[in-house]
Structure formats: C-alpha cells, structure tokens
C-alpha cells in the first residue's frame, strides 16, 4: 500500500482514470516479480555433537567435494522452467561443510588434516541437495520437499567403507518462503545430514583402526 500512496503522490490522477488503473497493474506486477525473484542462499550448517568417540588424537585426512550436477537446487514456484531459482553455490557451501566435518572429527577424538600421509582418508561428497514442490497436508496451502544426501567414503589401508546419509524435510506454507526461511531450512537440512554421517558407528570404527 505504501508504494501505491507514493505513486499517487507523485502522479495525482482522477479516480477511475485509465492511467491510474494502469499504474496499479504495473505496481502489482513489480511486487509479484519481487516475490518470485531468484535466491542465492548462504547456508550455515552446524553439527550438533553426540558422535562416537573412537579416536585417540590420530590424524584423519579429510576431503569434501561437490558431487551435484548443478548449484541450482530448485525453484520457489516449484516449476522447473521458472526463473525463480534457488541456488547454493559450491564455493560457499563446501568450505562450510568442511569446517563442520572437522569439528565433528575433533569431537570424536581425531585430528583432521588435509595432507595425505598414510592416515585414514575420509571423503565427503555432497551428492544431492534438492528443493521441490510437495503436496500440502491442508487445502489452500503450498508445500516444499527438501532433500540432502551426503556420501562418505573411508579408506584405511586395505579396508574401505561407504555410506549414504539422507536428510528430508517437508514444509507447508500459506505464503512462499522468503530468503531467510529458505536459508534456515536448507541449513538445518544439511546439519541433519552431517549429524547422520558422523553418528555412523561403522564409519567411526574404521577411522580408528
């Protein structure tokens, strides 16, 4: 409404005039475009702890890579051809996953390192990060379904272990989520996937061998 009063102040028009109606339509179009503008998220995943403590200070070589085909995780409208894309860039998310993985390893009793010096190697791959249209539980509501998959591979001598850890979330809404809401939901989704990864007892045991 504020935008309408400003327009009316700048361009005083007679009630019911065609020009006033055109300006109103233009304003609605601008507001709709803003509501569906692309979003580039700056996610901030956090591990929550409670991981198996199997280490005794030994080094673990940690590598984190992006295995996705695209940095676009979905669209705000749910339509694949929409321009209202939601993006999580690799150069932003991968270093943050690396930092949280290092924190998790330290809490498990290991010393994370980037050097390959004969230590066990843990490779984490962000395999999937998706934001799709879902089915709402109630009429007149929209819904989004989010999924993150992290793949972990441990190489320790002649022994290898691979695991895939999936986190899912369904969110219903009356109005399409804004940047803050989407950023929080994707951050929590990645946090959940990381927690699932480092709570794997078999992974922790092989790192400690």
Image (cartoon, rainbow, N blue to C red):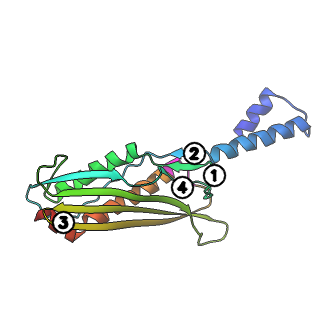
- Callout 2 secondary element: loop
- In the image as oriented, which residue stretches furthest toward the bottom? 137
24 displayed left or right of 54: right
- Callout 4 secondary element: strand
The circle on residue 82 is 1
- Callout 3 secondary element: helix
Pointer 2: what residue? 38
Real-space CA distance between mark 3 and mark 1, rounded to the nearest whole angstrom? 42 Å
Of pointers 2 and 1, the one earlier in the residue sequence: 2
Answer whether residue 180 is magenta in the image: yes
Cβ–Cβ under 8 Å for marks 2 and 1: no
Classify residue 17 by image quadrant: top right
Pointer 4: what residue? 74
The circle on residue 204 is 3
Of pointers 2 and 4, the one earlier in the residue sequence: 2
Q: In which quarter of the image is the N terminus?
A: top right
Q: Give the range drawn in magenta.
A: 177-181
Classify residue 101 by image quadrant: bottom left
Residue 35 % position (x, y) = 63, 47
Real-space CA distance between mark 2 and mark 1, rounded to the nearest whole angstrom? 10 Å
Of pointers 2 and 3, the one earlier in the residue sequence: 2
* In the rendered image, the vertical position of residue 33 relative to residue 57, given as above or below: above
Of pointers 4 and 1, the one earlier in the residue sequence: 4
56 displayed left or right of 136: left
Of pointers 4 and 3, the one earlier in the residue sequence: 4
């Amino acid at each position: 409404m504020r935008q309408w009063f400003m327009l009316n102040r700048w361009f005083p028009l007679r009630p019911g005039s065609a020009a006033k109606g055109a300006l109103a339509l233009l304003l609605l179009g601008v507001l709709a475009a803003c509501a569906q503008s692309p979003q580039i998220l700056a996610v901030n995943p956090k591990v929550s702890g409670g991981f198996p403590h199997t280490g005794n200070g030994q080094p673990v070589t940690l590598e984190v890579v992006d295995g996705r085909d695209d940095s676009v995780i979905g669209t705000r409208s749910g339509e694949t051809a929409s321009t209202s894309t939601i993006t999580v860039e690799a150069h932003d998310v991968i270093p943050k996953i690396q930092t949280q993985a290092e924190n998790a390893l330290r809490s498990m009793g290991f010393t994370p390192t980037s050097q390959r010096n004969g230590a066990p190697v843990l490779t984490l791959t962000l395999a999937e990060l998706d934001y799709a249209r879902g089915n709402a539980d109630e009429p007149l509501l929209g819904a989004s379904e989010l999924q993150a998959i992290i793949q972990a591979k441990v190489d320790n001598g002649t022994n290898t272990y691979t695991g895939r850890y999936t986190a899912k979330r369904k969110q219903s809404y009356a109005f399409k989520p804004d940047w803050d809401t989407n950023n929080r939901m994707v951050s929590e989704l990645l946090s959940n996937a990381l927690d699932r990864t480092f709570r794997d007892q078999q992974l922790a045991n092989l790192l400690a061998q």
